[in-house]
């Protein structure tokens, strides 16, 4: 079931529940084939709500969480424990409730001091690049990401890659963001080439404020102007939306999607029923 697919749920609550159960299904499927799985988390309201829904799911133990590597697609460069950090929100929503191996959880660096001097966001981004390479196969810069989650902003940003910003042109795996148009001004983000290294990329969005950017991205708008247009997986890309966010999905993309895999059908509950599924392109 490769290519790009648009899956629309009636509202944000049902969207979050469906993302959670779909994620359980996919991670369990990956572990059935290779024992361990690698997940890249995102910030944003839908992503955090999906993690919270996963924490509540009785099916969550279908995944061996001791064999899951956890990474982040971007981070606000703030002190450890700051409530605005994506890491903090993910830990509160889900991670603290799971039997994860601490050595397999890889948050992006926080705004701390090192040897009594402030660590710059550039140094922090370099540190994450080193951490990624340390867990990659020989000769590679990135580990193998099985599922990479992303949000989408109303102007089309994804991760912390904003339209026409230096980050959208970066070809390395990780970049420091300065003067971000959305606070806080300093961030760390995976780049579009790093995002595209993932087997599957899932873009999550809710609300009519996102509709125009999503429509533009799915019509193939230049990624410099709408960075979300450049986010795709090697084997599959899912746009997981509510009705409001899907309002401007191009009509020609709305063709029937292939049936879910057996493992998805066995785990995704009735909360996913009623979703409208569209095939975009291979």
Image (tube, helix red, strand yellow):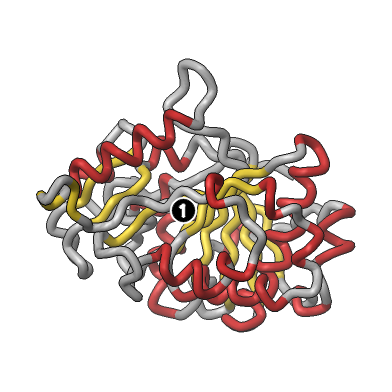
Query: Is residue 114 shown above or below 272?
Result: above
Residue 91 placed where, x, y %? 50, 68
Q: Percent position (x, y) of residue 269?
A: 82, 73
User: Horizontally, is 82 left or right of 55 in the view?
Assistant: left
Residue 239, position in %: x, y?
57, 59
Q: In the picture provided, is 26 more to the left or to the right than 142?
A: right
Mark 1, Cα crowd under 10 Å, few <14 / some 14-19 / many 20+, is: some
The image quadrant of residue 78 is: bottom left
In the rendered image, the quadrant that contains the C terminus is top right
Name the residue carrying label 1. Answer: 219
* Residue occupying image coordinates x 52% and y 56%: 149
Look at the numbered disc 1 and give the secondary structure of its residue.
loop
Residue 221 shows in the view: yes
In percent of the image, x 80 and y 74: which residue is there?
58
Determine if residue 281 is in view.
Answer: no
How many numbered dots are placed on residues in this image? 1
User: Which residue is more in the foreground, 112 or 107?
Assistant: 112
Spot occupied by residue 79 in the image (x, y as percentages of width and height): 26, 64
Task: Give 122 or 185, whichever is nearer the viewer.
Answer: 122
Identity of the residue furthest to the front in this view: 115
**What residue is drawn where x is 42% and y is 29%?**
133
Quarter of the rendering containing residue 167: top left
The quarter of the picture where the N terminus appears is: top right
Residue 28 position (above or below residue 19): above
Name the residue: 38% across, 57% down: 158
15 vs 43, nearest the viewer? 43
- Residue 122 located left or right of residue 73: left
275 vs 153, left or right, is right
Q: Residue furthest top?
A: 139
């Amino acid at each position: 079931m490769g290519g790009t697919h648009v899956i629309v749920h009636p509202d944000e609550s049902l969207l979050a529940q469906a993302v959670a159960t779909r994620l359980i299904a996919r991670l369990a499927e990956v572990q059935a084939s290779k024992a361990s799985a690698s997940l890249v988390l995102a910030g944003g309201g839908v992503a955090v709500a999906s993690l919270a829904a996963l924490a509540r799911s009785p099916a969550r133990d279908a995944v061996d969480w001791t064999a899951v590597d956890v990474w982040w697609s971007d981070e606000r460069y703030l002190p450890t424990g700051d409530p605005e950090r994506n890491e903090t929100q993910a830990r509160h929503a889900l991670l603290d409730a799971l039997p994860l191996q601490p050595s397999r959880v890889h948050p992006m660096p926080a705004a701390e001091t090192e040897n009594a001097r402030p660590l710059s966001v550039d140094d922090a981004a370099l540190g994450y690049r080193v951490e990624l390479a340390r867990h990659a196969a020989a000769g590679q810069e990135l580990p193998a990401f099985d599922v990479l989650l992303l949000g989408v902003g109303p102007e089309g940003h994804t991760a912390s890659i904003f339209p026409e910003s230096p980050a959208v042109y970066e070809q390395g795996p990780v970049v420091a963001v300065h003067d971000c148009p959305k606070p806080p001004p300093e961030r760390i983000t995976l780049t579009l080439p790093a995002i595209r290294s993932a087997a599957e990329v899932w873009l999550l969005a809710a609300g009519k404020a996102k509709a125009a950017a999503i429509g533009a991205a799915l019509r193939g708008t230049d990624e410099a102007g709408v960075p979300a247009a450049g986010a795709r997986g090697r084997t599959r890309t899912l746009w997981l939306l509510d009705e409001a966010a899907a309002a401007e999905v191009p009509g020609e993309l709305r063709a029937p999607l292939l049936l879910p895999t057996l493992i998805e059908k066995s785990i995704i509950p009735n909360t996913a029923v009623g979703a409208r599924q569209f095939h975009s392109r291979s």
